[in-house]
Image (spheres, helix red, strand yellow):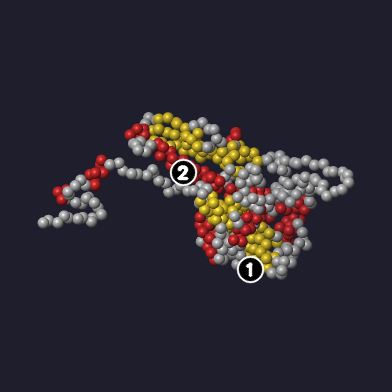
Amino acid sequence: MTEPVISTDSRGDAGEPHENRLSLGTRAARNLATTTKTPPQMQAITSRHLLRLLPWVEAVGGAYRVNRRLTYQIADGRVTFVSTGAQVRVIAAELCELPALRGYGDADVLASLADLFVQREYDPGQVIAEAGTPVDEVFLLAHGKVGKLGEGPYGGEALLGVLADGDYFGEQALVSADATWEHTVRATTACTVLALPREAYERLAARSESLHAHVRRSQEDPDRPRNAYGEAEIALTAGHRGEPVLPGTFVDYELAPREYELSVAQTVLRVHTRVADLYNEPMNQTEQQLRLTIEALRERQEHELVNNREFGLLHNADLKQRLHTRSGPPTPDDLDDLLATVWKNPAVLFAHPKAIAAFARQCNSRGINPQSVDIGGQKAPAWRGVPMLPCNKIPISDGGLTSIMVMRLGEKDQGVVGLRRTGLVDEYEPGLSVRFMGIDEHAIISYLVTAYYSAAVLVPDALGILESVEVA
């Protein structure tokens, strides 16, 4: 009796001779069957938490004006440098970021002043300025990170702050010969610093009457009452008795408030009529092409909301709202400092996934287990009750450095809002339209896909950024 032949070849009947088969092969049977298939997949699709959580405001007319109270205080800026090989120079016009030189317009004198800066290199741990000694030099930090150290309330050493690329210190040397350092400045990493001796500045000021007069005027405190935020003061009286004369007041506004114009992302989707006519079963080819195009457009939209130099959040954070990590990796102490910059109802933290992993490593090393919160039915890591959500649009530099953002959300809380315009012609999604453009002589159908968007920071303390976050 002949025993049946049992095949265990994973290839099925692909390599089996036709005369040896006893039934219909699977290869032939597939010709009569409908395969089970997925819609086209796209690896670039992310969770896009920023687009989901931003409160969206209608920008009628394509613009959004942010009115604020009149502010007298000008935020401290950062200085920009140029380098040729290892030689670093400060851009002369950037010296106007120093408080004493703000608004000074003589380009020739600024160029002469820039030439007086001397480049110095400091190793990690080296002291640049000692507390209690005279402030006889202005320092511009071209590269590296330094710590401001002072005496704590119990006599120990306390870290008062961290300065990094573009920051400056010792600017009191321009306005006072008797100023002393209130804290010690020590290099945390290898640093490149440009120093201006006071004697060199005084020799130049003696030759330039305009420079001397401008710096002298900068020392005069203008007679304009202001609050702790630099806003025009509202005169009030409290705790009085009897019938004193009450002060009169009014709330002054900025005369030239900032306006945010909607940005645009567009593309032209092309589909051949043969594809649209013959290959639309079981999935509509035009719909799938449009779906993936919109996904790519939304990814680009989130990227622009983070990185655009005009309205992107990384570039629109106030300079006083920017912090640097104490040691490199993001520690719980760094996150506490970051939350303190947006202490009024912080809503969410955004970080690159690698930055979240680096923070988790720091927590693990300290034996800390961060809590989690519910976001849209999913668990998300949190710090101090504020969810920390991934955003891969936050860039990581070649040196392995990135940033972490914290923000307050919504118009009601004077936070960060997204801007868009709905009710568009041929609107496909809120703020996104798909407009038919016709069929050309090559039988190709064209659709114009357009998204309008922007973002606005209503008050400076609505957004804080932790910079120089090491993820390696």
Nearer the observer, 178 or 307: 307
**Which residue is found at the position 47% from the left and 36% from the top?**
449
Q: Residue 72, image x and y in percent?
A: 73, 47
Q: Residue furthest left?
A: 1
Nearer the observer, 249 or 468: 249
- Which residue was labeled with disc 1? 126
Q: Is residue 145 visible?
A: no
Badge 2: residue crowd in 10 Å (few <14, some 14–19, many ≥20): some
In the picture, the quarter occupied by the N terminus is bottom left
Quarter location, residue 128: bottom right
**Which residue is found at the position 65% from the left and 41% from the top?**
66
Q: Which of marks 1 and 2 is in front?
A: 2
Pointer 1 or 2: first along the chain: 1
Q: Which residue lies furthest to the bottom in this view?
A: 155
Q: Tell me the kind of residue under disc 2.
A: Ala
Q: Tell me the kind of residue under disc 1.
A: Gln
**Which residue is found at the position 80% from the left and 45% from the top?**
235
Check disc 1 and report its element: helix, strand or loop: loop
